[in-house]
Image (cartoon, rainbow, N blue to C red):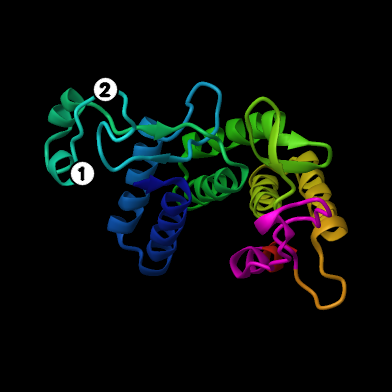
Amino acid sequence: EKLLYVQAGVMDNFLEAYQVSGENKYKEAASGIKSYIANFLSDQEKGGFYGSQDADVGSHGDGAQLITGDRYFPRSNKERLAMGIPYVDKTIYSDWNGMMISAYLRLYAVTGDASARDFAKKSIDRILADNFSTGHMCHYTEDGCRAGGFLSDQVYFAQALVDWYQASGERSYLTKAENLVGFMIAELQDVVDGGFYFQAFLPHGMGESLERRKPFDENAAAVKLL
């Protein structure tokens, strides 16, 4: 399975390796990930990145014959297309999109790929229009805001907004990032011991929603952002 956030992290790692070493193979690998994303994990018309693609063909019970990845991927591109395409989850998650937007903007900064910059901007504007609600980012939207106020969505999308501001100089996007940080501080901060909770306190929540967890990765990203 190809997860969007994994692709974003690997692209970023390849770009850093290229910057450190100067070896073109790393730059080419990063650009190769962008090509895959453009073909399978993005809405090229409206902007935005899809959540994931399955490893196997027919794994979602759509009537297609199940073809496992070990049989599918060794074949040529032409043969694979004739067999079908593994299912794509087209949900647009705010946090994972923030990660990929930041990776695209780094690709632009390092390689000068203007198409990466332009699609990053298109994606930012689409997600702000679709996934922003009452002062914070929703995790995703489906007939309205779903799972609003998670730390991961605020911090990674705010970072993407800061990255766009640094690339473009458009102050309005920095202001939007500052507003998301304001939500984090007001609703998610542990004012006694420091750090940020995974989500705001829900007095009528159930199960995991009652836990006051402070996830390490998201808190590290918040420190970098602040």
| Residue found 42% across the figure and 35% down from its top | 41
The answer to which image quadrant residue 62 occupies is top left
Q: Which residue is mark 2?
A: 63
Q: Which residue sits at x=26%, y=22%?
A: 63
Query: Which stretch is magenta?
Result: 196-221
Q: Residue 109 appears at what percent x and percent y?
A: 52, 50
Q: Main secondary structure of the magenta part?
A: loop
**Mark number, residue 69:** 1
Circle 2: residue type? Gly
* Residue at screen point 73% across, 56% down: 199
Residue 189 x/y as whole percent? 81, 65
The answer to whether residue 197 is magenta is: yes
Task: Describe the element under mark 1 as helix, strand or loop.
Answer: helix
Q: In front here: 223 or 213?
A: 213
Horizontal arrangement in the rendering, residue 130 relative to residue 56 (left or right) = right
Q: Say whether residue 188 is left or right of residue 64.
A: right
Along the line of sight, the residue nearer the viewer: 33 or 53: 53
- Asked if 175 appears above or below 223 in the picture, the reply is above
Q: Residues within 10 Å of mark 1 (few under 14, many from 20)?
A: some
User: What's the amino acid at mark 1?
Assistant: Gly
* Vertical arrangement, residue 108 with respect to residue 213, above or below: above
- Given residues 7 and 68, the one toward you in this image is 68
Task: Tell me, yes or no, whether the highlighted magenta stretch contains residue 178.
Answer: no
